[in-house]
Image (cartoon, grey):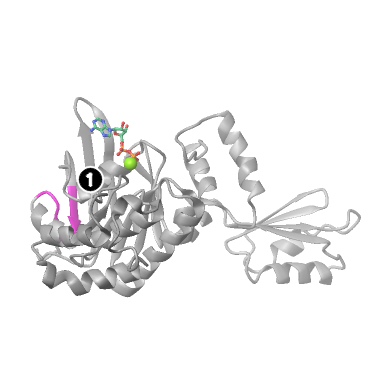
C-alpha cells in the first residue's frame, strides 16, 4: 500500500490504512483489521458508537499508540517507522480540552508554535490569521478559562493549525457542545478545509454530523469497519429513497405503470398507498405523478423518505444505532419508527 509497484512511495492518499489492529493487554481487541483510505482535501468521518475503536484508531494514526499489526501511512509517511515526521504533518484536536486556562488564547498558540520550533516573531502573522478565522480576535488576549465551550474548541482548532499541518485529526470534536455550538463548529471546519486545503479526519458518534459535514464516512463497530463510502452510496445500500403515493381507493392498479417509470427500482402496494423505491427521488416524483395522471388516477398525496445512516447501521448490524452506546432487540424495533418519523430529511 505504501509503495507503488516500482517501489516508490505513493502520495495519492492523505491517509492509507491497511489491516490495522490494536490489542490492549491482555486481550482487548479494540481495532481488528481495519482498512480504508482518505483522499486529500476531504472531510472523512469515522463514525461508531461508544467503545467501537475510534479513539484507538486515531491514536495509532497520530503516532500516540503503536499498532499491534498492520500498517498506516499519513501524508505518505509510515506511522510506526517515521513518527516524528508524521507529527510535523498533522494537527490534532482531542475530545478533552488541552488548552491552558491560565494563559490567553494567543499565548496558547505561541506555546504550540514553540513546540514545532517556531519563534513567536515567526508565527505572529499565522496566529493572527488563525485567530481571525476562528472569530477569536477580540478574545485573543483574554484568559482561556473565561471562554465558552465553543470558543475553547475553536481555539483548539486554531492551535492544531499553527504549524500549517496537511492533515487534521479531530476526535469527537463537538462532544459537550450544544446544537448551536456544534453547527457553528461545522462551519469553521468547512471553511478551514476550503481555505487551507487541509484534509480532515474526524471521529464522531453523532449521525447528523456525518450527514451534514463529511464527504465520505466509514462506520466502525466492535473494532471492524462495517461499511464505508459517501453518504449517498451508503444510503443506496438500504434501497435509496422511498416515495409514497396516496391515490383514491377505487382507482385502477398502478403497480405496472409506476414500475415502468425510468429510475424506479421496486413498487409495492398497500391498499391505496404505493411505495416506490428509487436511488434518488429528485426529478422522479413529477414523472410518477404524471404516469398516474395518464392512467386516469389523480395522486392525492406524496411523501419522500430519505434513508438515513441509522437505517444503514440497523440493516448492517441488526442493532439500532444509539448515540450513547449500544442497544439491541427492542430498541432496534423502536428505531424503525424513529427513522420513519424523521422521513424527508
Ligand atoms: N488503554 C486501554 N486499555 C484497555 N482497553 C482499552 C483501552 N483504551 C480503550 N480500550 C477498550 O478498547 C475499545 C475501544 O475503545 P476506544 O477506541 O476508546 O473506542 P471509541 O473511541 O470508539 O469510544 C473499548 O472496548 C475500550 O474499553
Ligand atoms: Mg473515543
| Residue 326 located left or right of residue 264 | left
Residue 197 appearing in the image? no
* Quarter holding ligand 2: top left
Check mark 1 vs ligand 1: CB closer than 8 Å? yes or no. yes
Residue 26, image x and y in percent?
19, 25
Quarter of the image holding residue 25? top left
Looking at the rendered image, the quarter that the N terminus falls into is bottom left
Q: Which residue is disc 1 drawn over? A: 59
Secondary structure at numbered mark 1: helix
Q: Residues within 10 Å of mark 1 (few under 14, many from 20)?
A: some
Residue 7, image x and y in percent?
9, 63
Task: State the residue at coordinates (77%, 68%).
Answer: 289
| Front in this rendered view, residue 209 or 137 | 137
Task: State the residue at coordinates (39%, 51%).
Answer: 149
| Front in this rendered view, residue 91 or 11 | 91
Which residue sits furthest top?
Answer: 26
Q: Which residues are magenta?
A: 71-80
Amino acid at each position: 500500500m505504501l509503495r507503488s509497484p516500482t517501489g516508490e512511495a505513493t502520495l495519492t492518499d492523505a491517509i492509507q490504512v491497511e489491516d490495522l489492529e490494536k490489542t490492549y493487554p491482555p486481550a482487548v481487541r479494540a481495532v481488528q483489521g481495519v482498512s480504508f483510505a482518505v483522499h486529500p482535501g476531504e472531510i472523512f468521518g469515522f463514525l461508531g458508537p461508544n467503545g467501537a475503536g475510534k479513539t484507538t484508531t486515531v491514536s495509532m494514526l497520530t503516532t500516540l499508540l503503536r499498532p499491534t499489526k498492520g500498517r498506516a501511512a499519513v501524508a505518505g509517511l509510515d506511522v510506526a517507522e517515521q513518527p516524528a515526521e508524521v507529527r510535523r504533518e498533522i494537527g490534532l484536536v482531542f475530545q478533552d480540552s488541552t488548552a491552558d486556562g491560565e494563559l490567553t488564547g494567543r499565548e496558547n498558540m505561541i506555546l504550540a508554535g514553540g513546540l514545532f520550533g517556531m519563534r513567536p516573531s515567526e508565527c505572529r502573522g499565522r496566529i493572527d490569521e488563525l485567530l481571525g478565522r476562528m472569530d477569536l480576535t477580540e478574545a485573543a488576549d483574554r484568559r482561556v478559562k473565561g471562554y465558552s465551550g465553543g470558543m475553547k474548541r475553536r481555539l483548539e482548532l486554531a492551535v492544531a493549525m499553527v504549524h500549517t499541518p496537511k492533515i487534521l485529526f479531530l476526535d469527537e470534536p463537538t462532544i459537550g457542545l450544544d446544537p448551536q455550538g456544534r453547527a457553528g463548529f461545522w462551519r469553521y471546519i468547512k471553511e478551514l478545509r476550503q481555505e487551507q486545503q487541509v484534509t480532515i479526519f474526524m471521529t464522531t458518534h453523532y449521525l447528523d454530523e456525518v450527514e451534514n459535514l463529511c464527504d465520505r464516512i466509514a462506520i466502525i463497530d466492535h473494532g471492524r469497519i462495517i461499511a464505508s463510502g459517501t453518504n449517498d452510496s451508503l444510503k443506496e445500500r438500504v434501497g435509496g429513497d422511498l416515495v409514497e403515493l396516496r391515490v383514491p381507493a377505487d382507482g385502477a392498479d398502478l403497480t405496472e405503470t409506476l414500475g415502468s417509470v425510468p429510475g424506479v427500482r421496486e413498487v409495492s402496494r398497500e391498499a391505496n398507498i404505493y411505495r416506490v423505491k428509487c436511488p434518488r427521488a429528485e426529478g422522479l416524483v413529477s414523472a410518477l405523478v404524471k404516469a398516474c395522471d395518464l392512467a386516469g388516477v389523480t395522486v392525492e398525496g406524496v411523501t419522500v423518505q430519505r434513508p438515513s445512516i441509522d437505517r444503514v447501521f440497523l440493516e448492517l448490524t441488526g442493532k439500532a444505532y444509539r448515540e450513547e452506546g449500544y442497544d439491541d432487540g427492542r430498541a432496534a424495533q423502536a428505531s424503525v419508527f424513529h427513522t420513519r418519523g424523521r422521513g424527508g430529511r
